[in-house]
Structure formats: C-alpha cells, structure tokens
Amino acid sequence: MVLPQIAIVGRPNVGKSSLLNRLARKRISIVAAEPGVTRDRVSAIIEVDSPQDRPRETPARLVEVVDTGGFGAYTALGKRFDDVGADLATLSPDIEAQIAIAAEQADLILLVVDVQEGLSSLDTSIATLLRHNGLAGKVLLVANKTDSAEWLAEGAAAATLGFGEPVGVSATSGFGVRGLLAAIRHRLPESGAGPDLALDDEMKIAIVAKRNAGKSTLINALAGEPRVIVSEIAGTTRDSIDVRFEIGGRRMLAIDTAGVRKRKSFADDIELYAYQRMLASIRRADVVVLMIDATVEVSQVDKKLTLELQALHKPTVIAVNKWDLVEDRVKTGDYLDYLTEQLRGLSYAPIVFLSASAGQGLGDLTAMAFNLYRQAGHFETTGRLNQVVESILRRRGPSPRLGRQAKVYYVSQIDAHPPTIALVVNDPALFEGSYERYLLNRLREELSYSEVPIKLLFRPRKRMTLDELKTQGRAKRSRAVEQ
C-alpha cells in the first residue's frame, strides 16, 4: 500500500521544519534561524490519530509528511553565499523543483504562514502559484506561531489567500496541534488507514561519505527519480533524507546523509547538526554504504568514518564511486590492495565498484547490501559455536598472565544485528586486545559472518547468568536504536 502524502510548503522561516518535527514527535529536519537550511524533501511517517480517537482494535492511520525547502530561500531573504563563496542562489531552481514535485504528488498540501509576521508578498505569490498549477483543492492553510488563543484573530487574516480559514498552531509549543491533526484527518482520502503497510520489512541503508563523493547521485539512481538535489556546491545536503523504493520485490529505505569534512572546518552549527544527524542515521541503519571517490586519495575523513562504523558494529559495503573515470589507468587489484591498506579496520567489508551517474554497478551494490543484512541477522547454534571456539583455542589460545591459563566455559549467541556472542570465561582480561582481534578473524572464517562485524562479550563465570547476558545484549541494542 502507498501511504497518503502531505507536503508542507511555504516561504522561508515560517516554521515548516519545526512543524514536521512536531507532527513526527522527534527531530527530523534541522531547525535554524538562517533561511534556506532545508533544501531537499525531508519526510517522516506519522500517525494522524491517537489511541483516544479510534477503537482499540482499529489500526492507526499512517501518512507520509514531506517537508520542503522555502520558496525564495536565497533570493528573497538571508545568506546567499556559503563559507567558501559559492553562490547558493544557484540552488533555488532545484529547491523549487523539489517543492513542485512534492506538491504535485501530495494528497494534501499544508501551506504554512507566519501569523506573527503577517502575510508577505511571497506568501501571495506561493498561493497564486498553487492555484495556477491546479492544486488549490489540496491546500489546507496553517497559521504557524499561533502561540495562544490571543493570536487566532491575527491568523484569520490569512484567509485572504483564498484557501478558507487557517488552522492556528504553534509548532514550537504544540498549541493547536490536535486541531491540525483533526483537520488533516478530515481532508485525507479514506485509503489512508494503512494496516497493510509493513514498515518492519524494510532494509534500511545509510549512504555516508565525505563531501562531493556522489551520495545524492546514488540515491537518485537507486530511486529512479531526482529525489534529492545534486549540485557541485559542496555540502548541498544538510538533513538526512529518507527515500523509499522497491528493488526485486524487496522494500528498501535509503538514507542520504550530509557530506562530511574535518570537524575543525565546520562552518556553523548547522553543519554540526548535520553531522549529528549523519551519526543518528548510521545507528538506525541495517547496512551502511561507505562511498569512496575513486578520483581522489582516501582522506582522513574517510578513515574517521571507518572508525565510526567500527564503533557502531555496522555491516558496511565499501562503494568505490566514479570508477568509470579511472578504470582505464588503475588496475582493480592494485586499488583493492590500496583500500585494504588505507581502511584497515574494515578489511572484512566487501567492495563494489560503481558509477552512480552512469547507473553502473547498482545491482551489485543492492545485492551485497541484502547479503550483509542476511549475514547480520543469522543466529548460530550454541553447539556449533562451542565447537568452533574450542577448535580455535586448541590451535592458539591467549597468552597466560601471571601463570593463569585462559579458559572458556560456555559460548552462546545472544543477539543479531550485529551478531553478538557471549563467552563465559575464567578471566576476561586474558582475551582483551590482540587475541580478541585474532578470535574475531577466525570466527569470520569459520561461521556465516564472513563480511559483517561481530560483537564479543567476555564475562567471568558465575557473575552473570546466560539470561542476564541475553538481557544485557538486548538492552545495549535498544539503547543504540534510541540514540
């Protein structure tokens, strides 16, 4: 089932991103006073009714809400040039094209105005454009920044735009949100119940890379449409963008993230927020695609991302982009050796070569992503694990310390995504460091986890039961998801 879509449109600084975050009940879009922060279509799936509004046995109505950039973000208001002097006004046609697509595809358009600033000529221009495009019947007028009932009369002036009485709401405080949700429910098509939509069967992949490696081009190639803006201006993508599509009958959620550069080079708080959103996207992803630009050397930023992926135990595909530009002068084997040397911590991660702009290698990339997802979800039997670990210890065990010999009493897998293996031992300190790395490498050779990270938990005997170990593993996974 395709969910009904709601597009949020308006001029800059009327609070569109804040409204999306309020409806989603979490921070999705970056919110800042500077106009033009949102450039792409940023979406979230929300419930438009609460348990009090429906019988207990009735599923929630789900809709996809899409935040858009502001009309005239760099030409009518605010900062036009970025920290390296690039003219951001050149992005305006792309931003407005994304707004037009969102509005055309939407079942309902929330036209947001600022009740405290009053109507502007740009508000009138947007209203005229919506009517000219035959979209007036979809519009629900929203008077944002209605912080209390005293502002409702001021918001009524927006009715002159010709879309009826506005719904007063404050995205910041939550005033009027229940009334807005009721108005949305009233305007939605009846097909919006959404009980058949299974979001849990989506494989979530996050695309991460340094700036201008081609992440947005890859997202558009996978989606088969210009879903995110592609520009030569570095740092065009600010928010993390969710794009849903199907490949081979399987659902996929691809997350385009902000391009990364050295932290000391961050231009402002917005870039810091974008970096934090990128880390959050890695945490919620099932598989991560680390894009490497084949036309330049592996950078410190690439290596920093490698460390983040290792710390979060994320299955990773290394995607070498723009390979078509160098393959006539670089041997594949030599480049593989080079990557293995530069990205040592991900030596087990599979590597695919592609050209996002030419659409080459996309099938290999998605097939590998699904393969890693399957590996990370595999559960090994306790008997097999104990047999394999015992065999590894016979070949080479940890070095004794102060006369103490390492002993493993019991081994069991307690979680998946990532595969988490608990080992009850006599002294966890004997297994730390180089022997833990050795054990991980041998386990990848022996078990069905050859290309994904494995998490090992060493615990002393009698201090924690197996059930407690399982509970601890699930709790850690839950905390990681919440972060």
Image (cartoon, helix red, strand yellow):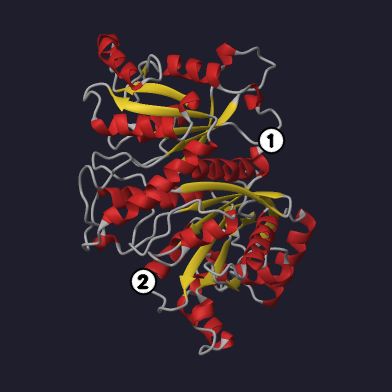
Residue 180 placement (x, y as % from top left):
44, 18
Q: Residue at x 33, y 63 (%)?
A: 261
User: Can see residue 49?
Assistant: no
Which residue occupies 22% across, 63% down? 84
Front residue (pair 138, 116): 138
Q: Residue at x 41, y 19 (%)?
A: 177
Say whether disc 2 or disc 1 marks the residue closer to the N-terminus: 1
Image mark for residue 1: 1
Marks 2 and 1 in Cβ contact (< 8 Å): no
Q: On the rendered structure, is 43 left or right of 386?
A: left
Mark 2 and mark 1: Cα distance apart in space: 43 Å
Residue shown at 65% from the left, 76% from the top: 396
Mark 1, Cα crowd under 10 Å, few <14 / some 14-19 / many 20+, is few
Residue 234 is labelled as: none
Residue 108 percent across, percent down from the top left:
51, 28
**Where's residue 238, x and y in %?**
37, 51
**x, y percent for residue 103:** 47, 36
Tag 1, which secondary structure? loop
**Label 2 secondary element:** helix
Residue 283 left/right relative to 377 = left
**Image quadrant containing the N terminus:** top right
> Front-most of 369 and 344?
369
Above or below, comparing residue 233 to residue 171 in the picture: below
Callout 2, which amino acid?
Gln
Q: Is residue 34 visible?
A: yes
Up-down: is 402 above or below 186?
Answer: below
Q: Which residue is tagged 2?
A: 300
